[in-house]
Every structure is written in C-alpha cells, then in structure tokens.
Image: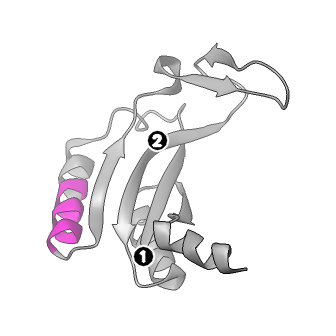
Amino acid sequence: MRFLMMHRLDESAPEAWNPSPEFIEKMGAFVQDWTERGILITAEGVHPSEKGAIVRKPRGATPTATDGPFTEAKEVIGGFALVNAADRAQAVEYARQYADLFDEIEVEVRQVVEFEDFEGLAAE
C-alpha cells in the first residue's frame, strides 16, 4: 500500500526554510536508506507559503485564489513523502522515524486511494 506523509512546520521557525548542513546530511542519509530499502517512492520539500497560493471553491461558487503567505495558519505544509508500507501501523511507524529527524514537526499519514479500491464499491 502507498501512504502519503505530509509534514507541517512552523514557518516562522528560523530552521524551517534554512536547514543546517548537519540536518541536510542526516536527511540525505535517511532518504538514501529508505530508497534502498524500497520504502520511499518520492519525497520533496516545498517553498515557504509566501511563494504559494490557496484556491478555494465554496459550494455553488466560483473558485478564488489567495496568494501567500498564509498568515491565518501557524503551521504550513513543509513537504511530503510517498512511501510503501504493509499497512497503516507500519506507515505510522515510518512517520515516527521521519518525525524524529526534526526538532518539532507534525506528520499527517494518509493512505493513497488505489484503482483497486473502487472495484469493491461497484459490487455494493
């Protein structure tokens, strides 16, 4: 099964968008290990919210876009990883290992919908 791990961070923290050389080295080794073990499919960090936008579409309305930064949010998405895991419990354990690389972070774990997931719904 594939799971998406999105990490949120406090973008006002100095290290949020300026990681130390030690952190970069630690993350690089972690990514290499997970890649070699077949856990990691892909992982990316994202730029600060000031370079982003949010598009919202209320029911029955036209979509609107708001440029960042997202001042209403204390924590923003800092990046994501897509991983292979046997089940949710294993994915959560991977998220714990990933979170342990950071001083402070929140990681949301969500199973990716596969095409096969819809086959069972058609029979109901």
* Res 32 quadrant in image: bottom left
- Total marks placed: 2
| Residue ID at (19%, 55%) | 28
Taking the image as shown, residue 16 lies to the left or right of residue 25, namely right
Up the image or down, 57 lies above or below 124; here it is above
Quadrant of the image for the C terminus? bottom right
Quadrant of the image for the N terminus? bottom left
Residue 106 position in % (x across, y down): 56, 56
Question: How crowded is the residue under tag 2: few (<14 C-alpha within 10 Å), some, or many (20+)?
Answer: many
- Cα distance between the residues tagged 1 and 2: 23 Å
What stretch of residues is rendered in magenta? Answer: 27-36
Up the image or down, 100 lies above or below 79; here it is below
Q: Looking at the picture, which amino acid does disc 1 mark?
A: Met
Residue marked by disc 2: 78
| Residue ID at (39%, 78%) | 85
Helix, strand or loop for disc 1: loop
The one of 120 and 29 positioned closer to us in this rendering:
120
As for residue 28 lying within the magenta part, the answer is yes
As for residue 81 lying within the magenta part, the answer is no
The one of 116 and 104 positioned closer to us in this rendering:
116
Residue 6 position in % (x across, y down): 50, 53
Q: Would residue 101 be visible to someone looking at this image?
A: no
Label 1–label 2 contact, CB within 8 A: no
Helix, strand or loop for disc 2: strand
Which residue in the rendered view is the most extreme toward the right?
60
Taking the image as shown, residue 53 lies to the left or right of residue 44, namely right
Which residue in the rendered view is the most extreme toward the front?
123
Residue marked by disc 1: 1
